[in-house]
Image (spheres, rainbow, N blue to C red):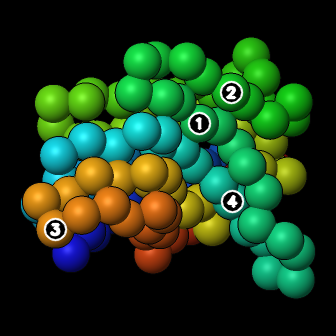
Amino acid sequence: QVQLVESGGGLVQAGGSLTLSCAASGSILSINVMGWYRQDPGKQRELVATITRGGSTNYADSVKGRFTISRDNAKNTVSLRMNSLRPEDTAVYYCNADSIMTSGGYVPRYWGKGTLVTVSS
């Protein structure tokens, strides 16, 4: 069984910074892609940033230049450094792991339970 546990959410003023972290645990052999998504109430979950095992990154246009995603393959962790935060960044942020190889077999996708980020104006 795989678990993803996020941390680092909270309340911050506009222009401030936060770092989200996510740790994957379980009988994990490798994770192909890890990433962050966010969701506002009443809206669809949207991609924020992803990073492959090899380090290739992908960002939503709305966060390019402000957010930085990184990962530690040995520790199965992924982080999201968020700078110059805006009120529109307010959402629940979810950690994601795609294409997971475990000792019990292949798992296509896993989600964390989410962490709330609130940016006040």
Q: In this view, does 38 lie to the left or right of 11?
A: right
Q: Is residue 101 left or right of residue 39?
A: left
Q: What residue type is labelled 1?
A: Thr
Label 2–label 1 contact, CB within 8 A:
yes
Disc nearest the viewer among 4 and 1: 1
Disc nearest the viewer among 3 and 4: 3
Image position, residue 65 (x, y; %): 74, 16
Q: Report which residue position mark 3 lands on.
A: 104
Alpha carbon distance from label 3 to label 2: 29 Å
Q: Report which residue position mark 2 lands on.
A: 58
Q: Report which residue position mark 4 lands on.
A: 38
Image position, residue 83 (x, y; %): 63, 27
Q: What residue type is labelled 3?
A: Gly
Alpha carbon distance from label 4 to label 1: 12 Å
- Check disc 3 and report its element: helix, strand or loop: loop
- Quick check: 46 above or below 49? below
Considering only order in the chain, which callout, 2 or 3, is on the residue closer to the N terminus?
Answer: 2
Q: Report which residue position mark 1 lands on.
A: 50
Considering only order in the chain, which callout, 1 or 2, is on the residue closer to the N terminus?
Answer: 1
Q: Which amino acid does label 4 sit on?
A: Arg
Residue placed at 52% from the left, 30% from the top?
Answer: 51
Residue 120 seen anywhere in this rendered image of the structure: no
Q: Is residue 30 left or right of residue 53?
A: left
